[in-house]
Amino acid sequence: MTTADQIKETVTNNDVVLFMKGTKSMPQCGFSSRVAGVLNFMGVDFADVNVLADEAIRQGIKDYSDWPTVPQLYVKGEFVGGCDIITEMTLSGELDTLFADNGIVFDKAAADKIREANG
């Protein structure tokens, strides 16, 4: 199986996937920590892929998405964005809409708290 096939299988078989440096319980960079923190706080069930554990995946995900940086968030197989995009979508409420439209369970009250704290 090629790296691209492996990535495609991961994003296809999981509703929400975060390719990140480290893991959701132990992020290894600030940007990965911020996105994982938002998802964890909102109670989203997501698969985490530690790009530091596999050099092929680390480069492969950048090629797969044509996006130069990690973390990268996928919802229902579609690339959503990196840290800045996810932060903006969280604050604007777009992330709530994306999750709701795709049947992803999340804590709306927690999402509202994030917005209140950053408003």
Image (spheres, rainbow, N blue to C red):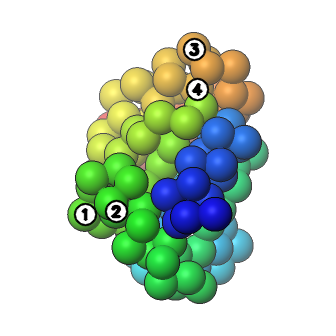
Sooner in the amino-acid sequence: mark 1 or mark 2: 2
- For residue 67, which quarter of the picture? bottom left
Q: Do the residues labelled 4 and 3 touch (CB within 8 Å)?
A: yes
Q: 10 Å neighbourhood of mark 1: few (<14), some, or many (≥20)?
A: few
Using the image, tell me which numbered label, if any, was put on residue 101: 3
x, y (%) of residue 25? 70, 73
Using the image, tell me which numbered label, if any, was put on residue 36: none
Q: 10 Å neighbourhood of mark 2: few (<14), some, or many (≥20)?
A: some
x, y (%) of residue 17? 60, 50
Number of marks in the image? 4
Sooner in the amino-acid sequence: mark 3 or mark 2: 2
Q: Mark 4 to mark 3: distance in Å? A: 6 Å
Above or below 58: residue 61 = above
What is the secondary structure assignment of the residue under circle 4? helix
Q: Mark 4 points at which residue?
A: 99
Sooner in the amino-acid sequence: mark 4 or mark 1: 1
Sooner in the amino-acid sequence: mark 1 or mark 3: 1
Q: Mark 1 to mark 3: distance in Å? A: 27 Å
Query: Mark 2 belongs to which amino acid?
Result: Lys
x, y (%) of residue 6? 61, 59
User: Which one is in front in this view, the residue at disc 3 or the one at disc 2?
Assistant: 2
